[in-house]
Amino acid sequence: MAMKPLDLLQQSLHQRVLVEMKGGRSYRGVLDAFDQHLNVVLSSAEEVVQETVTPRSGITLLRGDSIVYISP
């Protein structure tokens, strides 16, 4: 039986994930929460733009409609 995307995200909670965004930006961080629209909340996130890594403080909210993929 195939795994549904929300089931995979549920299994990835509290683990580091890579989130690729439209426009070429990527974020790496700990997946703290998500909703049915695939909006995600990351903690300990780093923004990755063309090999440049920028740490972000606090939490990072990424809108689901701007996400290309999420990799555990």
Image (cartoon, helix red, strand yellow):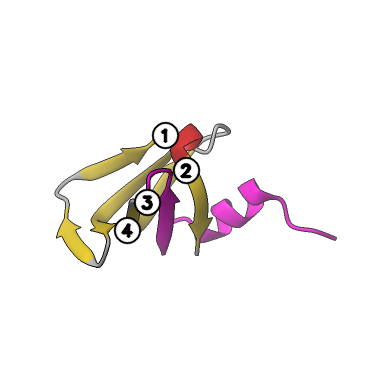
Q: Amino acid at mark 4?
A: Gly
Give the residue displayed 26% in from the left and 57% down from the top.
49
Q: CA distance from mark 2 to mark 4?
A: 14 Å
| Residue lying farthest to the bottom in this orientation | 51
Q: CA distance from mark 3 to mark 4?
A: 17 Å
Pick the front one: 47 or 37: 47
Mark 3: secondary structure: loop
Q: Is residue 47 shown in magenta?
A: no
Mark 3 closeness class: few <14, some 14–19, many ≥20 residues within 10 Å: few
Tell me the quarter of the picture where residue 45 sits. Answer: bottom left
Q: Position of residue 12 (x, y in %)?
A: 51, 59
Q: Amino acid at mark 2?
A: Ile
Q: What residue is pinned by disc 4?
A: 29
Give the mark nearer the N terminus: 4 vs 1. Answer: 4
Q: Are marks 1 and 2 in contact (CB under 8 Å)?
A: yes
Q: What residue is pinned by disc 3?
A: 24
Give the side of residue 39 with respect to residue 51, left or right. Answer: right
Q: Amino acid at mark 1?
A: Arg
Give the mark nearer the N terminus: 3 vs 4. Answer: 3
Give the residue displayed 85% in from the left and 60% down from the top.
1
Q: Position of residue 11 (x, y in %)?
A: 57, 59
Q: Position of residue 43 (x, y in %)?
A: 28, 51
> Which disc is residue 63 wearing?
1
Give the mark nearer the N terminus: 1 vs 3. Answer: 3
Span colored in magenta: 1-24
